Image (cartoon, rainbow, N blue to C red):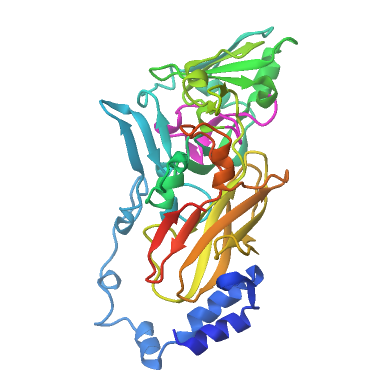
Amino acid sequence: MEERDKAKIAELAGGVAAGNGLLDRRSLLRAGVLAAGIAGIGAGVAQAAESVGADAPEWMKTPGRSFSPYGMPSKWQEKVQRSFTLLPGRPGTGTSRTPLHLLEGTLTPNGLHFERHHNGVPDIDPNRHELVIHGLVKRPLAFSVETLMRYPMESQIHFVECSGNSGSFNQREPQQTTAGGLNGLLSCSEWTGVRLATLLGEAEVNREAKWVIAEGADAVAMSRSVPLEKCLDDAMIALYQNGEAIRPEQGYPMRLLLPGFEGNMNVKWLRRLKVMNEPVNARDETSHYTELMPNGKARQYMFLQGVKSAIIKPSFGMNMKGPGFYEVSGLAWSGSGRVSKVEVSADGGKSWAAAALTPPVLSKALTRFRLAWQWDGRPSTLMSRATDEKGEVQPTRSVWVSQYSPIQFYHFNGIQGWSIEADGTVKHVYV
């Protein structure tokens, strides 16, 4: 792109909103059109595009394949896959990460939703599976899958994030991996199911009840304590994900959904809910998912996922193709509600510009943010900072790290950064 063209884009886009070439968010679409249209196309190219002849590509000359019983991604997208981290000798225990850097929008395809398993994925016969509600209730109940299907359902779009997501940020040196590698224990779906409050109301919870113990039907009977208040608020027994029955790795035939709470609490393959007056101190509430403090003590029951954002494009592995116009794009979310604002810096935090939030902006769901950037080819540092509707602001990494023991890695929500070198190389940096 010629220098006069770059200057024209910046001029017509409405000017610079922050240092180092970040453009006004309201002019993003207009600037994008201008950038695409400056090069133009010749009359000969346009005429060739309108004809179907000997020069046409092969897929325009022969009939395409027929129907299939279940649609699959294009073969050209075969590299859009999850990455895995498995414990040695335990193939069913570990994690897989959503390739955030290879996706767009906010909803995660079912086959790319991140996974966290403690002893493999059970193969559950839905005809033999039941959800039991018992404990401090007047009417203990058991629900088959077929019975739950008769209840009124609702659909809600929410993210699920492992509390260990972005855990490598406690390391001394920044991990050089993709945005999905850093933050891929995060996904967002439309969940459909039955409000847990409806079922608890039918069971008639006793007055002294304060907690509900959720247990899964996997080989470790994974259990977590959930405040009754949350169960009576927006908790759901989810049966469908993005329109189809929940897949086995996501808890088929049913899972607990606790919007905004750490992923481990959203118990998969749900089989039992015991109403109690105190938490159970399960394995995953003591040996895992706690916050280790500098004095050696650990905080338990830190459920909410904090306000957070991450720039996805550009990021590691997406080297810049020379100076010019680019879109800075990323994701923001908060376990407390809606994201109210995302700011982007291209000069390491010296100045900030408000990004455009792509609607709809939903509570406890991923929000896509975008901002136009006219990169001048000089070394730069990109950062994003989110604020939620409760007024909580994403902290710096240094502030987050200072709160905890050096080996604490749960619930990281600090500001993240990418350095852009003069040759276009993108690296992960601490800011």
Residue depicted at 67% across the width and 18% down the height: 200
Region of the chain picked out in magenta, as a range: 232-261
Q: Quadrant of residue 257?
A: top right
Where, quadrant-wise, is the N terminus in this rendering?
bottom left
Residue depicted at 56% across the width and 71% down the height: 20
Residue depicted at 34% across the width and 86% down the height: 48
Q: In the displayed structure, would residue 95 be above or below residue 299?
A: below
Q: Is residue 133 visible to us here?
A: yes
The x, y position of residue 40, in whole percent, is 45, 87
User: Along the horizontal axis of the image, is 234 left or right of 131?
Assistant: right
User: Along the horizontal axis of the image, is 262 left or right of 174?
Assistant: right
The x, y position of residue 75, in whole percent, is 29, 56
Please say whether residue 429 is one of the residues in the magenta stretch. no
Q: Quadrant of residue 274?
A: top right
Q: In the displayed structure, would residue 163 be above or below residue 377?
A: above
User: Along the horizontal axis of the image, is 208 left or right of 129?
Assistant: right
As drawn, the residue found furthest toward the right would be: 207
Q: In the displayed structure, would residue 247 be above or below residue 346?
A: above
Q: Nearer the viewer, residue 191 or 20?
A: 20
The x, y position of residue 419, in whole percent, is 45, 61
